[in-house]
Image (cartoon, rainbow, N blue to C red):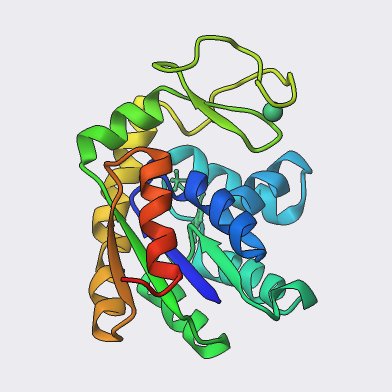
Amino acid sequence: MKIILLGAPGAGKGSQATKIAKEYGIPHISTGDALRANIANGTQLGKKAQSYIEKGQLVPDELVVGIVADRIKQDDCKKGFLLDGFPRTIAQAEALASLTDIDYVLNLVVDFETVKTRIGGRRMCACGESYHISTYSSDVCAKCNGKLYQRADDNEATIASRLEVYKNQTAPLVEFYQKLGKLIDVDGNKSISELFEDIKVILNGNN
Ligand code: ADP
Ligand code: ZN
């Protein structure tokens, strides 16, 4: 099962990706997480990517395509994988198509207003868990006791540019995958658990 999660920043790709990966036993590949890990580890790739991410711009295609190409070659991806945050441009989608076939493209559809509120109030834990200030008031993680923090690009100015980039460069992928007959829209305005139920119905072939 090879799946792409498509959707604006804050649409809930990360939250759903964790659940889907666990349910279906496939690796969760997040280019955003991979880039942040490279920045944290001070790699060459991280140094190249950092300024783009901080400005809310896309990291150059060749860098992210390289990450994904290496990752999906690994053994644990033989039975499938879940891509979160990739592809984000037509060029990335074409590069991916030359590497492998995809079974499902789940398009998480949300209102831009919802997305702004979600990202603005998002708090992260190093363990991968995330919270929202409207429903969680502690500053430590309920799972691991880690200290919660705000992602460097989760501020108002950067969010605005990420949404702009989404509209201009990523939204065209909706039509790209529609034409290939792979696109399935899901209502990302629902709660995390309701949305996951909808996704399971699709992936279990009961739609
Ligand atoms: P979100 O979906 O909430 O914006 P991500 O963690 O997926 O968060 O991405 C954070 C940032 O990492 C993006 O704004 C972009 O700068 C960079 N990035 C992640 N994936 C890609 C990609 N496929 N192509 C180019 N840049 C990427
Ligand atoms: Zn944690």
Residue drawn 44% across and 40% down?
55
Quadrant hosting residue 163? top left
Q: Is residue 52 visible?
A: no
141 relative to 165 in the view: left or right? right
Quadrant of ligand 2 in image: top right
Tell how many labels: 0
Q: Position of residue 123 (x, y in %)?
A: 53, 24
Q: Position of residue 113 (x, y in %)?
A: 21, 33
Q: Nearer the viewer, residue 135 or 23?
A: 23
Quadrant hosting residue 70? bottom right
Q: Nearer the viewer, residue 109 or 22?
A: 22
31 relative to 183 in the view: left or right? right
Q: Position of residue 197 (x, y in %)?
A: 40, 52
Q: If the image is split into quadrants, where does the N terminus sit? A: bottom right
Q: If the image is split into quadrants, where does the C terminus sit? A: bottom left
Residue drawn 22% across and 40% down?
112
